[in-house]
Image (cartoon, rainbow, N blue to C red):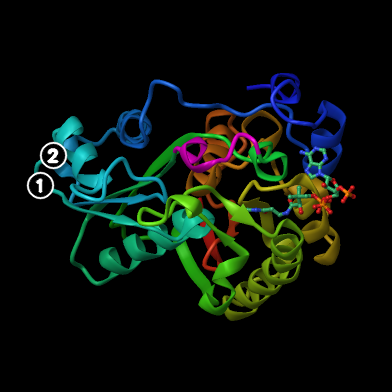
């Protein structure tokens, strides 16, 4: 759905959306559910990793928009893929969901409990968007991305994590109420979320790099949750880093919530932008409020 189409639905313009957010279009999954998008992404990840579905021990789906509360989305994915040996659960940390799901996978693998973990971020945010509210409907899009983490003796993978949550600020960004129809749509204080992101994302990245004894010059890319190009630019500026190190694709997809980081990672990977040993920082932030970062050696 392009900005032009949105301009016929609410009082907005291509120019406003582009200059304030960096978004030109977003995908709306009219005939596809959160679990169907998750299954598609997971199938591609399995193929890319050369792993059989039966070898997956755990499936985690990061989502704030599951098809149903029961069964969870991960179980639907399991059934569609034939991943009959997997334990399955969903995790809900909104736009920080994917990095938190990765940290869970890392912990299970390091504890020796799981060998191959399928981590998916999938959100059909269009379902909880109020298409008459111009302050939010221009921002979001639907999508899914997936990856597989495997036990491995070596020095690549997720090296460290820095994760945070502040539930006392939950009112700033909420939506999807099941009991209260008046609260079914996304309700957001955009400026508050903007300030929170610009302050907390550089802070978590700096604290992660300090903890891991890594200099920012060693980082090839900062793969940030794709919410607003101005947030990404402000983070780059505050960190005194070049925008070249902040790949972004929100122009085409908008904010896809838990899916934004894996979609961007997949594009970087398929475009041969990632080489073995590259150091990446992944950073997510959103409803909760929750935020955090991971240091990854590709
Ligand atoms: O995953 C995390 C989720 N959320 C975010 O990351 C969102 C973070 N926040 C943002 O990205 C920005 O705050 C927004 C893009 C949501 C809004 O941008 P802003 O520069 O903070 O604009 P604003 O809310 O201060 O609004 C400025 C003006 C207002 O009009 P007045 O009061 O100045 O006359 C709004 O009513 O822009 C108006 N406006 C719009 N105008 C045209 C708000 N939305 C639109 C729109 N089209 N779609």
Residue 129 is a magenta residue? yes
- Vertical placement of residue 262 versus 14, above or below: below
Query: Viewer-proximal residue, 259 or 242?
Result: 259
- Vertical placement of residue 68 versus 237, above or below: above
- The picture quadrant where one finds residue 108 is bottom left
Residue at (72%, 48%) from the top-left corner? 246
Residue 58 is situated, as x and y percent measured from the top left of the image, at 21, 53
Mark 2: is the Cβ under 8 angstroms from ligand 1?
A: no
- Vertical placement of residue 86 versus 3, above or below: below
- Residue 135 lies left or right of residue 159; in this view the side is right
Numbered mark located on residue 286 in the image: none
Q: Mark 2: few, some, or many residues within 10 Å (few <14, many ≥20)?
A: some
Judged from the image, the secondary structure of the residue bearing numbered disc 1 is: loop
What residue sits right under mark 1 in the picture?
A: 85
Residue 26 is situated, as x and y percent measured from the top left of the image, at 62, 29
Residue at (37%, 36%) from the top-left corner? 34
What residue sits right under mark 2 in the picture?
A: 54
Residue 130 is a magenta residue? yes
Residue 197 is situated, as x and y percent measured from the top left of the image, at 70, 63
* Tally of marks: 2
Are circles 2 and 1 on residues that touch, CB within 8 Å?
yes
Q: Farthest left residue?
A: 84
Residue 139 is situated, as x and y percent measured from the top left of the image, at 66, 40
**From which residue to which does the magenta span run?**
124-132
Q: CA distance from mark 2 to mark 1?
A: 6 Å
Residue at (82%, 34%) from the top-left corner? 18
- Residue 1 lies left or right of residue 242; in this view the side is left
Residue at (20%, 60%) from the top-left corner? 114
């Amino acid at each position: 759905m392009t900005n032009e189409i949105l301009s016929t639905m609410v009082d907005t313009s291509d120019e406003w959306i582009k200059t304030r957010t960096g978004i030109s279009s977003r995908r709306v999954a009219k005939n596809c559910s959160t679990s169907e998008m998750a299954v598609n992404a997971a199938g591609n990840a399995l193929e890319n990793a050369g792993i059989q579905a039966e070898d997956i021990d755990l499936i985690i789906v990061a989502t704030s928009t599951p098809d149903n509360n029961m069964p969870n989305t991960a179980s639907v994915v399991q059934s569609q893929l034939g991943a009959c040996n997997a334990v399955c659960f969903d995790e809900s940390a909104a736009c920080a969901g994917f990095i938190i799901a990765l940290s869970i996978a890392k912990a299970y693998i390091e504890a020796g409990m799981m060998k191959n973990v399928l981590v998916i971020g999938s959100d059909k945010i269009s379902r909880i968007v109020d298409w008459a509210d111009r302050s939010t409907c221009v921002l979001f899009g639907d999508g899914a991305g997936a990856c597989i983490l495997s036990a491995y003796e070596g020095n690549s993978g997720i090296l460290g994590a820095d994760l945070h949550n502040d539930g006392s600020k939950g009112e700033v960004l909420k939506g999807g109420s099941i009991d209260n129809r008046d609260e079914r749509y996304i309700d957001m204080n955009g400026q508050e979320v903007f300030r929170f992101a610009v302050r907390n994302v550089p802070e978590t990245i700096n604290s992660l790099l300090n903890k891991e004894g890594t200099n920012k010059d060693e980082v090839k890319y900062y793969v940030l949750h794709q919410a607003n190009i101005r947030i990404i630019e402000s983070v780059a500026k505050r960190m005194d880093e070049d925008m070249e190190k902040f790949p972004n694709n929100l122009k085409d997809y908008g904010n896809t919530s838990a899916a934004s980081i894996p979609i961007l990672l997949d594009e970087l990977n398929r475009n041969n932008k990632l080489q073995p040993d590259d150091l990446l920082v992944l950073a997510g932030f959103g409803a909760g409020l929750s935020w955090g970062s991971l240091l990854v050696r590709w």
